[in-house]
Image (tube, helix red, strand yellow):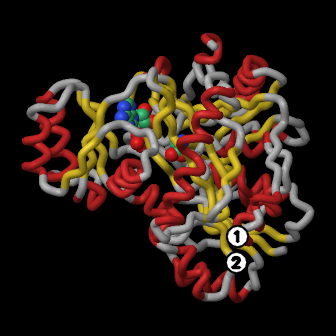
Amino acid sequence: MKILIVGSGGREHAIAAAVAKSPKADKIYCAPGNAGIGQIAECVPIGAMEFDKLVAFAKEEAIDLTIVGMDDPLVGGLVDEMEAAGLRVFGPRKNAAILEGSKAFSKDLMKKYNIPTAAYENFDDPQKALAYLETAKMPVVLKADGLALGKGVLICETLDEAREGVRTIMEDKKFGAAGNRMVVEEFMTGREVSVLSFVDGKTIKIMSSAQDHKRALDGDQGLNTGGMGTFSPSPFYTEEVDAFCHRHIYQATVDAMAAEDRPFKGVIFFGLMLTEDGPKVLEYNARFGDPEAQVVLPRMKNDMVEVVEACIDGTLDQVELSFEDNAAVCVILASEGYPVSYEKGFEITGLKNFDNKDGYYCFHAGTAKKDGKIVTNGGRVLGVTAKGETLKEARANAYEAAAWVHFDRQYMRRDIGKAIDEA
Ligand code: AMP
Ligand code: GLY
C-alpha cells in the first residue's frame, strides 16, 4: 500500500514509525513531514492546510490510505474533502472533529449525555461572562472555544485575574477567532491522565494510558506548552479508574456522537482528571496526543495499518488491541525560550547514536535539513523515547539517551515521570 501521513511533528514521526513496521506499507509519504520523518518516508512539500493540493497529490500518486495526524486539518474538514474525492482516509469528518474544535460543543455534549466533567457555562458575550464571574467560585478556568495550540486555557486564582482573562480571550482576541465564544469552568484538582482510543463510529478500543507534562519548567512551573514529556502507562490509571471510564465515559462519548448524527471515526484522546469524586473529562482531542503518541505507539503490538483500516471499515470490534508489558518515557528536547520565542537553525549532532538501538527512539518535531545537516527548526525539536521494564527504568534510559544528542540553546525538563515515584 501507498500511505500518506499529514503533519510534521513528533506525533507524525511516531505514526510513520508505527506504519513503517506494517508489512502492508510499501511506500510512505508525509506532508509536509520533517528531517527525521524523511528517513522513513518521502516528504512532500505540501502544507497540512493545503487541502486541494493534498487531494490532488493523493489522487495522482494513487495513495491507498491517508492518516491525518494534526488537529487543524481535521477540524477544517480535510477528511470530508478526501472522501468526496473517493480517497480512503483515517480521521474524523469535520462534523465529528468538532469534539475537539469547539469546547462549548463538547461541554454541551457531555452535559446532555451525563458524561462526567467539570460544571460550566458557555458565553458569547463578554459582558455576560463578566457578570457571571462576580458570583463564581475561585479559582475558575476560562477556555477559548476553538483551537488555540493548547494555549487557550487560563486558570484564574482571583476575580481580577478572571476579569482580565475575559478581556484577553473575548475582547483582545489573543487566541483569535477561537475566543468568539468562551467556556467558564469549575476548577478541578487531581491527577491528569491521557487516554487515547481507536474508534470506528460504533466501537471504541482503548490504548495504554499516558501522562503529559504541559508546563515548560521543572516542578510544573512556567508557561503551558504543547507538552514537554510523557510516560506510559500511568500508574494512577488503575483497574478501578479504567472500569469507571468504560462505564461512564468512553462508550458514552462514542454513542453520544452517533446519536447526534456525527459518527466519530479516528482517534479520540480523552484528557481525564482523576478527582476525589471520580474521573472527569477535562477535554477531548480528535487525534493522537503529541507527545503521548511517542510513548504509546512504540508499545503497541498490533499492526497499525490493520487497526486504522478496521476503524475506516467499521470492523474494530474484531480487533484486539495489545500493548507490551513494559513502560516508555519521552523527554522533549526544546529550544531555549520555547514556548515564547526562540532561535532556529542550530546543527543537531549525535543522531546516529540511535541507529540500531532497540527500544530507543529519537522522534523529530521541529527539525529541517540544511546543507546536508539536520538543524533545529521549532520550539519542540526532538522527542527522545526509551522503553524499560518499569517506568523507572524507562525514565533512566530516556535521560541517558537524551544526552546522546546535542544542539545549541537546548533545554529539557529533568523531572519527566518523576510523579511515578509517588505511585
Ligand atoms: P485543556 O486544553 O482543556 O486540556 O486544558 C489544558 C490544561 O489546563 C489541562 O491539561 C489542565 O492541566 C488544565 N485544566 C483545564 N481545565 C481544567 C479544570 N477544569 N480544572 C483544573 N485544571 C484544568
Ligand atoms: N499532549 C497534549 C496534546 O496533544 O494535546
Question: Disc 2 on helix, strand or loop?
Answer: loop
Q: Quadrant of residue 45?
A: bottom right
Looking at the picture, tell me which residue is in the foreground, 178 or 95: 95
Residue 290 horizontal/vertical position (percent): 58, 45
- Disc 1 designates what residue? 312
Q: Nearer the viewer, mark 1 or mark 2?
A: 1
Amino acid type assigned to the residue bearing label 2 in the image: Arg
- C-alpha span from label 1 to label 2: 8 Å
Q: Are marks 1 and 2 in contact (CB under 8 Å)?
A: yes
Residue 253 horizontal/vertical position (percent): 52, 52
Amino acid type assigned to the residue bearing label 1 in the image: Ile
Residue 92 makes an appearance in the image: yes
- Disc 2 designates what residue? 88
Residue 342 makes an appearance in the image: no
Q: Is residue 423 left or right of residue 286?
A: right
Instruction: Tell me the residue at 55%/36% (across/down).
Output: 334
Q: Residues within 10 Å of mark 2 (few under 14, many from 20)?
A: some
89 lies above or below 137: below
Instruction: Tell me the residue at 56%/57% (across/down).
Output: 254
303 lies above or below 63: above
Residue 44 horizontal/vertical position (percent): 66, 72
Instruction: Tell me the residue at 66%/68% (across/down).
Output: 90
412 lies above or below 63: above
Question: Disc 1 on helix, strand or loop?
Answer: helix
Residue 142 horizontal/vertical position (percent): 27, 40
Q: Is residue 67 left or right of residue 103?
A: right
Q: Quadrant of residue 41?
A: bottom right
